[in-house]
Image (cartoon, rainbow, N blue to C red):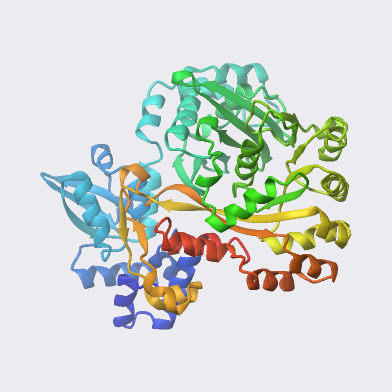
C-alpha cells in the first residue's frame, strides 16, 4: 500500500486512525488515483472540511483563504493551464512581482508546488482552502479554455435565443443558429482539439444546469470545457447536420458519420451517436484515424509466447479464433491486425461489421443494417455462398450467429469474431449458454484471447517509483521475483498533458484450445475448472500479463490495478 504524507500527518495527530487511513487509501486506489485523499476522508465523514483546512493551516503555518469571497484576475488564471489545476487540485489566486500565490487543498503535496515553480518560473507561496472551494473556483474561472474564449468573443447571445428549449422546435430557426459563425468555429475547435490531444472519443453532455465536453484520452475521461447552456441545441444540431442526421428528431437515438479532410491529404472519420436524455441529446463521437491504426501484431503488446500461439492459430486453414473484452478494449484493432497479416491476393476475406470502422483494400467489408434485416446471421449466410476463405464477424450476439459461425469453422473456413466476456475461460461457457453443443465448441474453437488496454508511462517524464515489496506480492508477483521489478511512473509533462501517461498497451490472456482443455469442455467442466487447468498449462492471466508490462517498465502498478478492477483474473 502506498503511503500518503497527508494521511500520515492526520494519523500522527490523532485526527484519523491508521485503519481509517488504510481504508481511505484503498478507496483512492480503487478510483485509479482520481479521488483526492482529503475528499475521501470528508465524504466518509471522518473529518469535516473546515476542520481539515484549519488543521492544515496550523500544521504548515499557511494562511487560509475563502475563494468564494475573492475575485481572481483573469491574467493570473492564465498562468497555470486548466489540465494542471485539475491534476493537482489547486488554483492561482494572485501575483506579486515574481511571487505567485496558489490556493491548495493539500499543502503536503510539495511535488505539485515544485512542478508549478518549474512550469511558471515564479516563486510559489501557498494558501490553504477546502477541496470543494477549489473545485468551485476551477468551474468558475476555467469554464472556458483560452481557445474557447477566443471563439466566444464574437458571439451574439441574442442570436441564439432562436434556439428554443421546448419540445416544439422551429427547425428553420435551429438551422440558422447552427450556421452562426461562432457555433461553427466552436464545433470545429472541439473536433480539431480532440485530434490534437489524441482523444479516442468526444462526449458532449447536457445536464439541467450545465453543459460539458469531455475527451477520452488513453481510456480515461477528462473534462475540457463547459460551453454556455444557450449553445446546447445549436452545438448538438450543428453536429447532427455534419453527420447528415435529422435535426428535428430529438426523441429517438440516431447514428451517423462525419468525415473531414486534414492537411497533408489526411482524413479523419468520426462515428456519431446521438442519445436522447432527460435534458437534451447526448452526443458521443468516436475518432477513427486510420493513419494511427496500428495493425502490426508485434507492436500491440503481445508477449512472445502468446503472439506465437495467436499467429499459429490464425494461419490455420479452418477453425475459430475469438477475441473477447469490453467495449474500448482494442478487440477491433486485434482483429484488423490479424486480417492485415492474412490479407493476400490468394485469400477471399469477407467481414460483417457494425459499424465498419476502417476500410481496407482487398477485404470485402459489409455494413450491418438491422432495420432492413441485414444482421450478422444474414451476412454470414451470404458469405458462405461467396466462396470465402476467411470470415470476420463483428460480434457473436445470439445462437443463430454462433451456430452458423461454428458450422463455417468446421467446414473449411477460418472464422474470426468477438464476444463480450471477462476472460478467455468464461468464453467457453458463454458459447455453451447460447446453445452450442460442447463437442462443437471443442472442435471448432482454435484459440480465445481476452484483452484490456492500459496506459503507457510517458517516456518523456518517466521516473522510478518506490513500491513496497508487499504491495507487489499482494498484486500477484511471486516473492522470489520481487527484486527483479523496477517500477516506474510518469511525473507529468506537457507531452502527456501532465497525466504521466502517453499511449496505451494491451494486456492479453491468450488461451489456445489445448487437448486437456478440449477434454474438460467435453466433460462439462465449469469456468473455474477451465481457468485452473489453463493456468496449470502455463497460460497467463491478464493480471500476470499486466505485471509483465510493469517489470518491463511499460506501465505502472497503479495502472495495472486500475485496469484489473474491470476484469476477473
Q: Quadrant of the C terminus?
A: bottom right
Image point (29%, 76%), residue name? 9
- x and y percentages locating residue 172 in the rendered image: 65, 16
Residue at 82 percent of width and 47 percent of height: 409
Quadrant in the picture for residue 164: top right
In the rendering, at what x and y percent does residue 480 appear?
43, 78
In the rendered image, the vertical position of residue 27 relative to residue 237, given as above or below: below
Looking at the image, which residue is at 75% across and 33% down?
A: 350
In the image, 466 versus 164, the foreground residue is 466
Q: Is residue 384 left or right of residue 454?
A: right
Q: Quadrant location of the N terminus?
A: bottom left
For the question of whether residue 261 can be seen, the reply is yes
Residues 127 and 494: in front is 494
Question: Which of the 4 image quadrants contains residue 169?
Answer: top right
Nearest the eye: 206 or 419: 419
248 on left or right of 556? right
Q: Is residue 31 visible?
A: no
Q: How many marks?
A: 0
On the picture, is 145 further left or further right than 542? left
The picture places residue 75, in percent across and down from the top left corner, at 24, 37
In the rendered image, the vertical position of residue 246 relative to residue 6, given as above or below: above
Image coordinates of residue 541 in percent, x first then y, are 59, 65
Amino acid at each position: 500500500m502506498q503511503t500518503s504524507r497527508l494521511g500520515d500527518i492526520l494519523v500522527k495527530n490523532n485526527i484519523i486512525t491508521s485503519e481509517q487511513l488504510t481504508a481511505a487509501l484503498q478507496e483512492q486506489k480503487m478510483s485509479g488515483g482520481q479521488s483526492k485523499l482529503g475528499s475521501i476522508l470528508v465524504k466518509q465523514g471522518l473529518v469535516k472540511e473546515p476542520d481539515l483546512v484549519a488543521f492544515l493551516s496550523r500544521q504548515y503555518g499557511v494562511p487560509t483563504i475563502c475563494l468564494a469571497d475573492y475575485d481572481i484576475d483573469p491574467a493570473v488564471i492564465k498562468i497555470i493551464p486548466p489540465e494542471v489545476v485539475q491534476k493537482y487540485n489547486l488554483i492561482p489566486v494572485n501575483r506579486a512581482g515574481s511571487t505567485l500565490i496558489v490556493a491548495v487543498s493539500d499543502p503536503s503535496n510539495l511535488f505539485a508546488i515544485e512542478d508549478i515553480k518549474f512550469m511558471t518560473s515564479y516563486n510559489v507561496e501557498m494558501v490553504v482552502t477546502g477541496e470543494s472551494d477549489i473545485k468551485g473556483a476551477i468551474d468558475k474561472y476555467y469554464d472556458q479554455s483560452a481557445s474557447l474564449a477566443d471563439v466566444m468573443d464574437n458571439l451574439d447571445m441574442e442570436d441564439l435565443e432562436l434556439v428554443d428549449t421546448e419540445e416544439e422546435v422551429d427547425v428553420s430557426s435551429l438551422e440558422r443558429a447552427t450556421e452562426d459563425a461562432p457555433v461553427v468555429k466552436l464545433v470545429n475547435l472541439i473536433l480539431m482539439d480532440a485530434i490534437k490531444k489524441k482523444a479516442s472519443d468526444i462526449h458532449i453532455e447536457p445536464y439541467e444546469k450545465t453543459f460539458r465536453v469531455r475527451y477520452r484520452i488513453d481510456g480515461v475521461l477528462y473534462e475540457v470545457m463547459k460551453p454556455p447552456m444557450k449553445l446546447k441545441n445549436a452545438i448538438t444540431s450543428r453536429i447532427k447536420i455534419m453527420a447528415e442526421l435529422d435535426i428535428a428528431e430529438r426523441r429517438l437515438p440516431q447514428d451517423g458519420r462525419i468525415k473531414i479532410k486534414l492537411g497533408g491529404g489526411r482524413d479523419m472519420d468520426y462515428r456519431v451517436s446521438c442519445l436522447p436524455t432527460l435534458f437534451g441529446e447526448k452526443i458521443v463521437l468516436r475518432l477513427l484515424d486510420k493513419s494511427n491504426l496500428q495493425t502490426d501484431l508485434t507492436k500491440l503488446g503481445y508477449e512472445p509466447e502468446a503472439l506465437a500461439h495467436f499467429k499459429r492459430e490464425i494461419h490455420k486453414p479452418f477453425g475459430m479464433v475469438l477475441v473477447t473484452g469490453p467495449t474500448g478494449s482494442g478487440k477491433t484493432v486485434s482483429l484488423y491486425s490479424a486480417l492485415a497479416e492474412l490479407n493476400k491476393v490468394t485469400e477471399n476475406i469477407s467481414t460483417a461489421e457494425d459499424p465498419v470502422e476502417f476500410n481496407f483494400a482487398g477485404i470485402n467489408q459489409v455494413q450491418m443494417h438491422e432495420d432492413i434485416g441485414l444482421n450478422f446471421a444474414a451476412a454470414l449466410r451470404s458469405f458462405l455462398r461467396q466462396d470465402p476463405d476467411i470470415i470476420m464477424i463483428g460480434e457473436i450476439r445470439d445462437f443463430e450467429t454462433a451456430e452458423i459461425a461454428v458450422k463455417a469453422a468446421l467446414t473449411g473456413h477460418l472464422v474470426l469474431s468477438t464476444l463480450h466476456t471477462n476472460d478467455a475461460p468464461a468464453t467457453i461457457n458463454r458459447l455453451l449458454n447460447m446453445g452450442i453443443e460442447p463437442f462443437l465448441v471443442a472442435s471448432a474453437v482454435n484459440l480465445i484471447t481476452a484483452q484490456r488496454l492500459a496506459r503507457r508511462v510517458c517516456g518523456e517524464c518517466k521516473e522510478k517509483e518506490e513500491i513496497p515489496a508487499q504491495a507487489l506480492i499482494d498484486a500477484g508477483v511471486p516473492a522470489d521475483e520481487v527484486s527483479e521489478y523496477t517500477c516506474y511512473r510518469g511525473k507529468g509533462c506537457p507531452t502527456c498533458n501532465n497525466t504521466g501517461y502517453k499511449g496505451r498497451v494491451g494486456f492479453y490472456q491468450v488461451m489456445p484450445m489445448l487437448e486437456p482443455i478440449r477434454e474438460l469442455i467435453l466433460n462439462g467442466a465449469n469456468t473455474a475448472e477451465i481457468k485452473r487447468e489453463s493456468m496449470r498449462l502455463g497460460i497467463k492471466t491478464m493480471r500476470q500479463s499486466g505485471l509483465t508490462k510493469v517489470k518491463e517498465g511499460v506501465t505502472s502498478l497503479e495502472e495495472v490495478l486500475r485496469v484489473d478492477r474491470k476484469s476477473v483474473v
